């Protein structure tokens, strides 16, 4: 499995391999082969702190937002 973050696009690619099974196989419902998933993210992504974990067959990708600049009011002098 490969996870890439380019600009604001997250791309996950990989291969799902067929598991060896014993006995009679009556029906196969799992997909096998190459897969690719792409998603566009907001501009405020903190690319340095992206985390990914795989546990019990579930992939979790955490993409935190960057801290936004504080808004401040500027007084106009006359």
Image (tube, grey):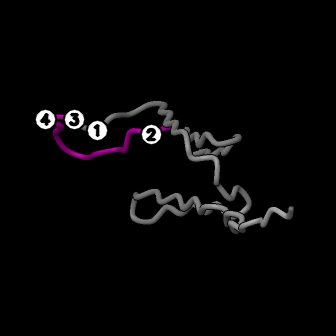
Q: Nearer the viewer, mark 4 or mark 3?
A: 3
Instruction: Tell which circle, 1 or 2, labels the residue nearer the N-terminal end.
Output: 2
Where, by quadrant of the figure, is residue 5 drawn?
Answer: top right
Instruction: Tell which circle, 2 or 4, labels the residue nearer the N-terminal end.
Output: 2
Which residue in the structure is indicated by mark 3? Answer: 28
Q: Nearer the viewer, mark 4 or mark 1?
A: 1
Which residue in the structure is indicated by mark 1? Answer: 30
Q: Secondary structure at mark 4?
A: loop
Question: Which residue is at a point 70% across and 68% down the rendered structure image?
Answer: 70
Which residue in the structure is indicated by mark 4? Answer: 26
Q: Secondary structure at mark 3?
A: loop
Separation of residues labelled 1 and 2 (CA atoms): 9 Å
In this rendered view, identify the residue nearer to me: 39 or 60.
39
Q: Residue 63, percent across and down? A: 58, 59
**Dots 3 and 2: beta carbons under 8 Å?**
no
Separation of residues labelled 4 and 3 (CA atoms): 7 Å
**Dots 4 and 1: beta carbons under 8 Å?**
no
Which residue in the structure is indicated by mark 2? Answer: 16
* Magenta residue span: 14-27
Q: Secondary structure at mark 1?
A: loop
Q: Residue 76, percent across and down? A: 81, 62
Give me the disc on residue 8. Answer: none
The 10 Å Cα crowd at callout 4, few under 14, some 14 to 19, many 20 or more, is few
Separation of residues labelled 3 and 1 (CA atoms): 6 Å
User: Is 20 in the magenta?
Assistant: yes
């Amino acid at each position: 499995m490969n996870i890439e973050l380019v600009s604001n696009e997250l791309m996950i690619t990989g291969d799902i391999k067929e598991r060896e099974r014993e006995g009679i196989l009556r029906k196969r419902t799992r997909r096998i082969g190459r897969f690719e998933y792409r998603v566009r993210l907001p501009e405020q992504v903190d690319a340095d702190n992206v985390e990914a974990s795989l546990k019990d067959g579930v992939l979790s990708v955490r993409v935190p937002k960057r801290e936004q600049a504080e808004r401040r009011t500027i007084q106009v002098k006359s």
